[in-house]
Image: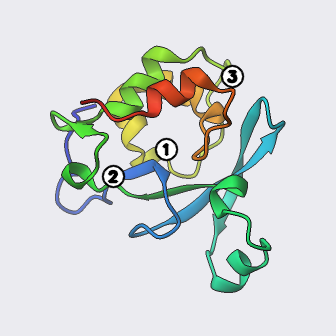
Amino acid sequence: MNGHAAPPGEAPMSCPSGQPDMEGARIFGVVGGTADTPRVDYLKQDAIITDAMLGSLGGMDPTHVFRFAAKCEEGRCAQFANGRCSLGQRIAEGLAPVVDRLPSCLIRPTCRWFRETGEAACFRCPQVVTLVPADQNRLRELSAPEA
């Protein structure tokens, strides 16, 4: 858990809070649960993002339906500070766990949050959604980039 980019020859670090248009974007979960208590169900295998698949959402924002990972943009991201992802740290410290064992996760080997905060991030990750519901004030507070 060194908080730096992957060494040469290793896969680049993944952002578990990516957008579908980011470099290397991939779907790693489907947003389920309820509007008040969203939960991410993790995929067992990679899903390819296609224009047809995104078009089938009927105009709905893909981040309402899917959780995306992408290549960590490091210093180009407002969440990146002092060589680490401040969002992952805030999630690990500021949200209560929602699972008591590690979820099956396709991106864990390259996940920046896991690399930097360990299992603490994984126990909270299923409640993290890209478009935060209005009543999820704590998650909304934690997701605001640090000044």
Q: State the separation of the CA atoms marked 2 and 3.
A: 24 Å
Q: State the separation of the CA atoms marked 3 and 1.
A: 16 Å
Q: Residue furthest right?
A: 34
Residue on which disc 1 sits: 108
Residue type at mark 2 is Met
Residue on which disc 3 sits: 99
Whether 103 is drawn above or below 96: the answer is below
Q: Earlier in the sequence, mark 1 or mark 2?
A: 2
Q: How many marks?
A: 3
Residue 88 in the image, given as x and y percentages of width and height: 40, 32
Q: Is residue 20 left or right of residue 118?
A: right
Question: Element type at marker 2?
Answer: loop
Residue type at mark 1 is Arg
Whether 50 is drawn above or below 24: the answer is below
Residue 110 in the image, given as x and y percentages of width and height: 40, 50
In what quadrant of the picture does the N terminus appear?
A: top left
Is residue 25 visible in this depiction of the protein? yes
Residue on which disc 2 sits: 13
Whether 79 is drawn above or below 92: the answer is below
Residue type at mark 3 is Val
Question: Element type at marker 1?
Answer: helix
Q: Is residue 107 left or right of residue 58?
A: left
